[in-house]
Image (spheres, rainbow, N blue to C red):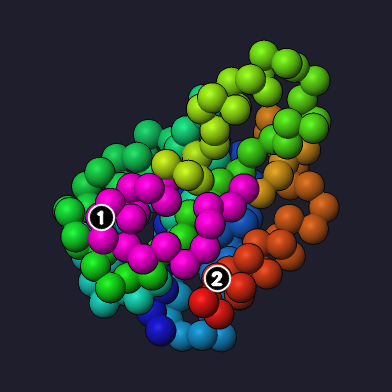
């Protein structure tokens, strides 16, 4: 299996999740983990699994992740298994009715990433997943790296 994990990260939290996912996949074959700024479309050649992650910024993925997804031509991911994740703050930790309402309206980054991957022909192997940070800049909440590892293992069983 050849897998590519593409991520963007502001404070290192999303990068940690991407590395945990990549390390979990490393026993399955050839795994490449790349920051989105280092990805070229040639990296998609021969990929069996593509996983894309972003911090949630203003209820959506970062611009570099969005630009990367938009650069993939229609049906270019045909036959490729795809998954999407984000990092976010838990609404249980944010005492703001306004922010809770905004999240219900606009959501998090993982869902639009998954939608774009599917639009490009990818076969979604897991529901979009969010991993939690303790504060705006992190760090990750306890056990999130283990949860990321379990998430991708479960996704590949399908």
Residue sitting farthest toward the top: 98
Is 62 above or below relative to 80? above
Q: CA distance from mark 1 to mark 2?
A: 19 Å
Q: Is residue 120 left or right of residue 33?
A: left
Quarter of image, res 10:
top right
The residue indicated by pointer 2 is 155
Residue 9 can be seen in this image: no
Q: Is residue 34 left or right of residue 41?
A: right
Is 40 above or below relative to 130? below
Front residue of 65 and 120: 120
Position in image of residue 149 (x %, y %): 66, 68
The magenta stretch spans which residues?
A: 113-130
Front residue of 81 and 41: 81
**Tag 1, which secondary structure?**
loop
The disc label shown at residue 23, or none:
none
Residue lying at 74% horizontally and 65% vertically, measured from the top left: 146
The residue indicated by pointer 1 is 120
Front residue of 60 and 103: 103
Residue lying at 42% horizontally and 63% vertically, measured from the top left: 124
Quarter of image, res 82:
bottom left
Q: Earlier in the sequence, mark 1 or mark 2?
A: 1
**Tag 2, which secondary structure?**
helix
Front residue of 149 and 83: 83
Quarter of image, res 41:
bottom left
Residue 132 can be seen in this image: yes
Residue lying at 46% horizontally and 60% vertically, measured from the top left: 83
Position in image of residue 135 (x %, y %): 75, 32
Is 138 above or below relative to 150? above
């Amino acid at each position: 299996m050849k897998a590519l994990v593409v991520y963007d990260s502001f404070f290192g939290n999303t990068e940690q999740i991407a590395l945990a996912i990549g390390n979990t996949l490393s026993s399955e074959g050839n795994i490449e983990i790349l920051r989105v700024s280092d990805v070229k479309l040639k990296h998609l050649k021969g990929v069996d699994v593509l996983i894309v992650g972003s911090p949630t910024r203003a209820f959506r993925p970062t611009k570099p992740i969005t630009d990367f997804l938009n650069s993939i031509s229609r049906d270019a991911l045909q036959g490729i298994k795809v998954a999407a994740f984000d990092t976010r703050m838990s609404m249980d930790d944010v005492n703001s009715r306004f922010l809770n309402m905004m999240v219900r309206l606009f959501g998090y980054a993982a869902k639009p990433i998954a939608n774009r991957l599917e639009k490009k022909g990818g076969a979604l192997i897991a529901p979009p997943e969010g991993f939690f940070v303790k504060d705006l800049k992190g760090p990750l909440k306890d056990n999130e790296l283990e949860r990321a590892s379990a998430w991708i293992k479960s996704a590949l069983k399908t």
